[in-house]
Amino acid sequence: MELLAALGLMLVIEGILPFIAPRLWRETFRRATALDDGQLRFIGLTSMIAGLVFIVLTR
């Protein structure tokens, strides 16, 4: 049940920027597609580590 709540919260957070500022979101997405694989992997790894730190700190 907590996993579904976390997934729902993630979807809400990810939907905020395209809802509030669609032009900025589109430009950000365009820039992200121009990054090479190594840069995207680093961003993904950093995001996962930050998420794990937040989970550990809130438990």
Image (cartoon, helix red, strand yellow):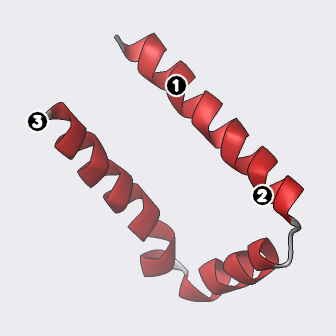
Horizontal and vertical percent for residue 44? 68, 48
Mark 3, Cα crowd under 10 Å, few <14 / some 14-19 / many 20+, is few
- Does dot 3 land on a helix, a strand or a loop? loop
Residue depicted at x 66% and y 80%: 24
Circles 2, 3 touching at the beta carbon (< 8 Å) = no
Q: Label 1: how many residues lie within 10 Å, few (<14), some (14-19) or many (20+)?
A: few
In the image, residue 39 lies at what x, y percent? 86, 55
* SS at circle 2: helix
Quarter of image, res 1: top left
Real-space Cα separation, disc 1 to disc 2, in angstroms: 18 Å
- Image x and y of residue 28, in percent: 72, 75
| Towards the viewer: 18 or 40 | 40
Residue 58 vertical position relative to residue 14 in the rendered view, above or below: above
Cα–Cα gap, marks 2 and 3: 31 Å
13 lies above or below 28: above
Farthest residue in the left direction?
A: 1
Tell me whether the residue at label 1 lies in contact with that at label 2, contact meaning CB atoms closer than 8 angstroms: no
Residue at x 80% of width, y 45% of height: 42
Label annotation for residue 40: 2
Per the rendering, the mark at residue 52 is 1
Reading the image, the residue beneath label 3 is: 1
Would residue 16 be found to the left or right of residue 17 on screen? left
Nearest to the observer: residue 58 or residue 44: 44
Question: Considering only order in the chain, which callout, 3 or 1, is on the residue closer to the N terminus?
Answer: 3
- Which amino acid type is marked by label 2? Leu
Residue 40 higher or lower than 54, as above or below: below
Q: Residue at x 55, y 80 (%)?
A: 21
CB-based contact (under 8 Å), mark 1 and mark 3? no
Task: Kindly identify the amino acid type of the residue bearing the numbered disc 1.
Answer: Leu
